Amino acid sequence: MPATNAHNGPVAVLGAGAWGTALANIACDHRDTLLWARNKEVASEIQAKHTNRGYLPDVALHASMQATSGLSAALDYACAGTSPGLLILAVPLAGLRSLCELVSEGLAHRTDRISGIIWTCKGLEASSGKLPSQIAQEALGADLNIPSGVLSGPSFAREVAQGLPVALTVASQSAALRSSCINALHGGAVRVYTSDDVVGVEVGGALKNIMAIACGISDGLGLGTNARAALITRGLAEMTRFGEALGARPATFYGLTGLGDLVLTATGELSRNRLVGLEIGRGRSLSDILAGGLTAEGARCAQAVLLRAQSLKVDMPITRAVCEVLFQGISPIGAVTRLLAREATTE
Ligand SMILES: NC(=O)c1ccc[n+]([C@@H]2O[C@H](COP(=O)([O-])OP(=O)(O)OC[C@H]3O[C@@H](n4cnc5c(N)ncnc54)[C@H](O)[C@@H]3O)[C@@H](O)[C@H]2O)c1
Ligand SMILES: O=P(O)(O)OC[C@H](O)CO
């Protein structure tokens, strides 16, 4: 069992999809770790067989990993260490608000037993256009007063679960939480960098998914590698403009959670967002592609980003083109023609 120190409380990862399972597997190398799955069968499989075949086929999980389908049991676990525990919320953005509300209820009167809460979702809320940090602040409630932050960066869960190298960034206003996160995850094949630009990290993670859909569409149409490079570069400019308007630092977009994750998701064959674009470019409908429950957060958040950009008076031509194709019946090639027909401008 790992030794105890000020940063060595238990880790509870909430959400046992691909990313939650991969993160819990890393945390097991450093601290006592439990994974919460809302599905009983998934929790039983992890606990009994140390596999999660539905999300990470062919991966043998750490023998010390605990699992439960009881959320209150998971919170009890995080609170019961000799040092305060760390919570990592690994559900998609659509589940963040409801999970934070449940966590807030479950932690009342014992907030001193938790050192921090980290979320990993990438997107803006479809109904409100809010960032994960704004959602978490509202749903956890001001009284909870636990340090919080976001973990992001270029990371396909499957590669991480296979032990391949990866670099991530944790962003938080709390230096103590940043150190706790490093203590829980950094080491071996995993590097964890730190930042205090929470908004920049969140905007990068949300918008790279939209740009990955755009690149997928372009590749699905067979428009070539020049077109893909142009979309990545102008997509990064679009992400940076949007982030700056929300108070993010431009430099954040040239780091792991901006450019790094954009390149990975726009070009990597494991990306679900890129897959959505590829299939759209090949002629399939969005509803058909998402019918099996694929987690592709760029599609959900594109309209929210466009609405927010309009109110911020930020020009987002690639995001607008993605929305036109996904939701307004414009053909992929029609959207490309419109993008190319815009006035010439300075870079
Ligand atoms: N998969 C990756 O490679 C990867 C890497 C980095 C970040 N992320 C981010 O992590 C988040 C999770 O992604 P994932 O790939 O693990 O998704 P996933 O589809 O593999 O799994 C999502 C899990 O969350 C659970 N869930 C969904 N809504 C929930 C709710 N309301 N309450 C409780 N549980 C809920 C599902 O049952 C499932 O177990 C996403 O925001 C994604 O962008 C994913
Ligand atoms: O499969 P995607 O497109 O959701 O991307 C997964 C991660 O966000 C990559 O960092």
Image (cartoon, rainbow, N blue to C red):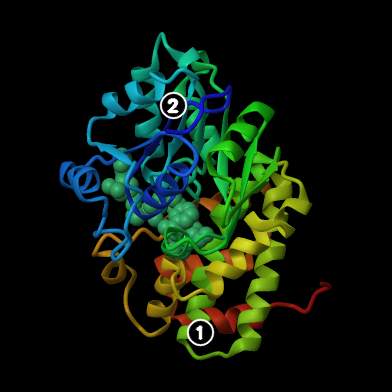
Residue type marked 1: Asp
- Asked if the residue at label 2 sits under 8 Å from ligand 1, the reply is no
Residue found farthest to the right: 346
Amino acid type at mark 2: Ala
Image quarter of the C terminus: bottom right
Report the residue marked by disc 2. 139
| Vertical comparison of 59 with 25: above or below | below
Q: Nearer the viewer, residue 323 or 250?
A: 250
In terms of image quadrants, where is residue 195? top right
Q: Is residue 92 left or right of residue 343?
A: left
Q: CA distance from mark 2 to mark 1?
A: 39 Å
At a point 34% along the width and 42% down the height, the residue shown is 15
The circle on residue 219 is: 1
| 321 and 19: which is toward the camera | 19
Q: Would residue 301 be visible to someone looking at this image?
A: no
Name the residue rendered at 64%, 34% in the picture: 178
Position in image of residue 100 (x %, y %): 40, 29
Badge 1 crowding class, 10 Å Cα cut-off, few under 14, some 14 to 19, many 20 or more, is many
Q: Secondary structure at mark 2?
A: helix
Q: Where is residue 173? Give x, y as percent.
A: 67, 30
User: Which of the marked residues, 2 or 1, is nearer the chain's N terminus?
Assistant: 2
